[in-house]
Image (cartoon, rainbow, N blue to C red):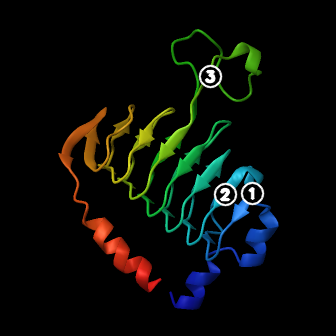
Amino acid sequence: MNYQQGIASFLTECELIDFGFKYLGKNVLISRKASIYNPEQIELQDNVRIDDFCCISGKIVIGKYTHITPFCLIAGGVLGVSIGNYCTFAYRCSVFSQSDDYFGNSMVNSTIPEIFKNEIKKEVLVMNHVIVGASSLILPGVTVAEGTSIGASSLLTKSTEPWGLYYGIPAIRQKERSKRILDLLDNFENTH
């Protein structure tokens, strides 16, 4: 595939404007194969990239230089998902700000009116310099602190502390993460 074919895989600037996003930064790349719902609630900062087969819906803010790789689901729902700058979500990650009641105390699924449901609704915050490993899941109400690294196939049920490596089911802090990224950021921002 040459460069022109690669660019044709993404929506044009005019097509992106026609979506009617709440905010649309510069140099945003969204695959033609991605599904975008509720664009009027979605804010995309500069240099955001959303790849093939992603589903982005509800109230969402995605910070600059953030990459959502193929097959990810970001479900902002009513209260929202806010993602910081310089973040990466590897293949098949899911982020939910809402969840049905799994204990049987209410009816479940989107076809049921709200009065028969007891849905959990809590904002999700993902701070700057976060990387989420392939097939990981972030549940409602979690804050992923700055510099957090989440290992592949992890289930994040609780908020993290800054600059840690978390993994497992449920994910727990296993190691410290280097802050060298911050030195690299200074050089990056001076050249871009």
Residue 180 appearing in the image: yes
Residue 36 appearing in the image: no
Gap between marks 2 and 1 measured at Cα: 5 Å
Image point 50% across, 43% down: which residue? Answer: 125
Gap between marks 1 and 3 measured at Cα: 26 Å
Amino acid type indicated by mark 2: Glu
Q: Name the residue under label 2.
A: 43
Image point 45% across, 36% down: which residue? Answer: 142
Amino acid type indicated by mark 1: Lys
Q: Mark 1 points at which residue?
A: 22
Q: Residue furthest top?
A: 105
Gap between marks 3 and 2 measured at Cα: 25 Å
Image point 56% across, 67% down: which residue? Answer: 48
Give the number of the mark in front: 1 or 3.
Answer: 1
Do the numbered discs 2 and 1 sit on residues whose CB atoms are within 8 Å? yes
Image point 62% across, 22% down: which residue? Answer: 119
Amino acid type indicated by mark 3: Glu
Which of 116/64 is in front?
64
Badge 3 crowding class, 10 Å Cα cut-off, few under 14, some 14 to 19, many 20 or more, is some
For mark 2, give the secondary structure. Answer: strand
Residue 87 appears at what percent x and percent y?
44, 60
Badge 1 crowding class, 10 Å Cα cut-off, few under 14, some 14 to 19, many 20 or more, is some
Q: Name the residue under label 3.
A: 119
Residue 137 appears at what percent x and percent y?
43, 41
Q: Earlier in the sequence, mark 1 or mark 3?
A: 1
